[in-house]
């Protein structure tokens, strides 16, 4: 038996049908969270975000393609259920891809799938992710890296897709970016929120973001999961399969503390031509980095 190839990814089983894939050695130090959901009755795997494309400086890593890892890599699931076989051995199941938003650390791996698989993205702000605007809004141009080419199918709010059951719902959740997309898996009571929020790392708003819209989106997600005790939240970084209501409530509370002045600015700096600020909660569970303008705008609208 040939030795196992070392991969830029590692898989963790969240349920019988859902896995978290972490990209652990990317040169950007983003370490994005990627999720795959098996729909065996549809002969399909839904890939939620595609990471940084396996770009690494670790010379011992041999598998840098997300698709190759899924089809040929050792999942190394760190649990008692793994059999050592690839997650989709030989590519027997088809793929559909959902991008929670267009930032580079979520789309650079899409090239592995776009040639033969549907790619879904939010239909809330089509111009934001147009071919002309994607290099800027993905931040690829800022980094001096090629922007991946793909032609997404834009989904409406509360939309469904043909490759998954009717109770898998796509939700427009603008805030972090205009094209932020959440996915609600009602059958497993699992909510995928991309970079809308997470714990133990700064929630970051780029200059195109909006705290005003973020608050509205988080309120809508709280209303969505409230009737489902035990619902879990899966984020684009650092937080996976945690209690959804508790994380949503506490993240919202932290942002309200920022707007009310209970949280003070810990750092000021300039980024992409804008004055930016950083807030850090005691204990560091939640923190925020954003243009100061976004805080002022949200305070004005919410009377803070």
Image (cartoon, rainbow, N blue to C red):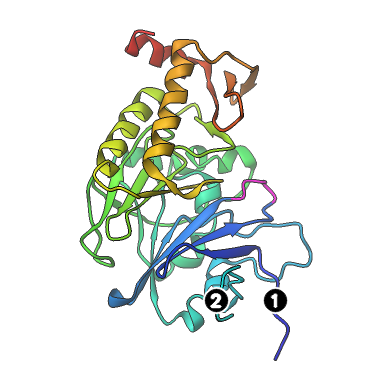
- The residue tagged 1 is 5
Magenta residue check for 280: no
Q: Residue 201: percent from the left, percent from the top? A: 59, 36
- The residue tagged 2 is 82
Question: For the magenta stretch, what is the residue range?
Answer: 27-31
Q: Main secondary structure of the magenta part?
A: loop
Q: Residue 75: percent from the left, percent from the top? A: 58, 72
Q: How many marks?
A: 2
Name the residue: 37% across, 35% down.
178
Q: Is residue 283 left or right of residue 134?
A: right
Spot the residue most to the bottom.
1
Could you say whether the residue bearing mark 1 is in a helix, strand or loop? loop
Please tell me which residue lies in front, 135 or 263.
263
Q: Residue 205: percent from the left, percent from the top? A: 49, 30
Q: Quadrant of the C terminus?
A: top left
Name the residue: 46% across, 79% down.
91
Mark identifier at residue 57: none
Where residue 98 sits, quadrant-wise, is: bottom left
């Amino acid at each position: 038996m040939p030795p196992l190839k070392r991969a830029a990814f590692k898989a963790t089983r969240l349920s019988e049908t859902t896995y978290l894939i972490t990209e652990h050695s990317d040169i950007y130090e983003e370490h994005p969270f990627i999720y795959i959901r098996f729909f065996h009755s549809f002969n399909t795997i839904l890939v939620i975000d595609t990471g940084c494309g396996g770009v690494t400086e670790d010379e011992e890593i041999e598998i840098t393609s997300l698709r190759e890892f899924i089809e040929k890599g050792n999942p190394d699931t760190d649990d008692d259920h793994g059999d050592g076989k690839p997650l989709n051995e030989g590519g027997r199941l088809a793929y559909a891809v959902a991008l929670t938003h267009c930032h580079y650390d979520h789309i650079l791996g899409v090239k592995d799938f776009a040639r033969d698989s549907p790619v879904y993205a939010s239909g809330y702000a089509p111009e934001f992710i147009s071919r002309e605007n994607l290099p800027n809004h993905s931040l690829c141009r800022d980094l001096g890296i090629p922007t991946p080419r793909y032609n997404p199918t834009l989904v409406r709010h509360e939309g469904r897709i043909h490759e998954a059951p009717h109770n898998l719902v796509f939700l427009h959740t603008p805030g972090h970016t205009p094209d932020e997309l959440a996915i609600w898996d009602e059958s497993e009571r699992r909510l995928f929120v991309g970079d809308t929020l997470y714990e133990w790392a700064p929630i970051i708003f780029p200059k195109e973001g909006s705290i005003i819209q973020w608050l509205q989106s988080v309120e809508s997600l709280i209303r969505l999961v409230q009737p489902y005790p035990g619902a879990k939240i899966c984020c684009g970084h650092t937080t996976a399969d945690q209690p959804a209501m508790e994380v949503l409530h506490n993240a919202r509370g932290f942002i309200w503390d920022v707007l009310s002045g209970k949280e003070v600015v810990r750092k000021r700096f300039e980024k992409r031509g804008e004055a930016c600020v950083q807030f850090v909660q005691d204990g560091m569970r939640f923190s925020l980095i954003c243009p100061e303008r976004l805080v002022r705008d949200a305070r004005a609208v919410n009377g803070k």
